[in-house]
Amino acid sequence: MAKQQFGGDWTEDKLSRVKEYFERYNTALKNQPFIREYIDAFAGTGYREVRCEETDEATQFPELAENEVRGFLDGSARIALKVEPGFTRFTFIEKNPKKVEDLRRLKEEFADKDIRIECGDANEWVQSICRESWNYRRAVLFLDPFGMQVSWQTLKAVAATKCIDAWILFPLCVGITRLLRKDEIPDESICRRLDFVFGDRSWLDALYRQPASASTAKTQRTLFDEPEEESHPVRRIELSAIEEYYRARLRTIFARVANNSFQLRNSKNVPLYLLYFVAGNEKGAPIAVKIAESIMRRDQPRCSERRI
């Protein structure tokens, strides 16, 4: 079986919280006349392994690397299949053909389940699924990429169904802050990459302090002894402000968004990822968000990852 290697103790904690939401979600809706669907956009193999595999993402982001493999553990797909009370339908999306083969074996193992497997780009498949009929359907979507693969257009499509709750893993310090330079505006190619995640370029004004005004700018003498203004460089704002900005963006499209996020931190206490919860259905959103907020509010265990 191909290796789905990712994370450390914080990954286990993340999945345990998501599993708790699956259980409480299905309990709440089990007597409702809806098909309850689970959609995993980066399903992998169905298993995960603590150490990161040598992928482009892992090479680019060494925080994802671990030296020791502690064996296979249930990944999000397998966890969702085992939840009781259970979902009535499952959709697993995976781009890697080798991992798709593993998912097909997983489908054989859970032959009594209604499982749909799609091979291809997660954004394309999620948007396609969102264009289907959502009469008498409700779903939980898990968007758990390694990096910055989830587009804003995909999130807009999810929100437009008004039937899907989603857990969204946001690559704060393994993606976003690496592109948001501290003392200068990123170049145009990077700006477009950030636009892909945030939806537009409002992040530029929101996440950077602008140069000082002419009245407060320092001056220096030019070669010809003429005064010339010296603007202060732009400065990226704090991580907490980036967290709040993305939450504010999510609130522009979803019915409700949880007020807190689950922070996946490394051994240096740096938040590598943020896990957000959004609710799509206006009627069910208050209780869904209340449950998610309580799950994310639980104390986070100490991380035992290798220092980076």
Image: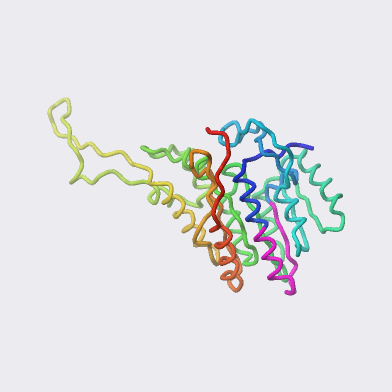
Relative height, residue 35 to residue 302 (above, below):
below
Name the residue: 71% across, 47% down. Answer: 75
**Residue 218 left/right relative to 166:** left
Residue 223 vertical placement versus 49 (above, below): above
Q: Give the residue displayed 55% in from the left and 62% down from the top.
A: 293
Query: Which residue is located at x 61 percent, y 33 percent?
Result: 65
- Colour scheme shown: rainbow
Residue placed furthest toward the left: 225
User: Could you say where residue 41 lies in the image, as x and y percent from the top left?
Assistant: 68, 50
Q: Decide which of 274, 215 is in the foreground and name it.
A: 274
Locate residue 163, reporting x and y percent: 65, 66
Q: Is residue 35 left or right of residue 10?
A: right
Q: Nearer the viewer, residue 20 or 195?
A: 20
**Residue 23 colored magenta?**
yes
Whether 181 is drawn above or below 19: the answer is above
Q: Which residues are magenta?
A: 20-40
Tell me residue 289's x, y (percent). 57, 65
Q: Quadrant of the N terminus?
A: top right
Total numbered badges shown on the rendered structure: 0
* Residue 13 spot, x, y in % from top left: 62, 50
| 65 drawn magenta | no
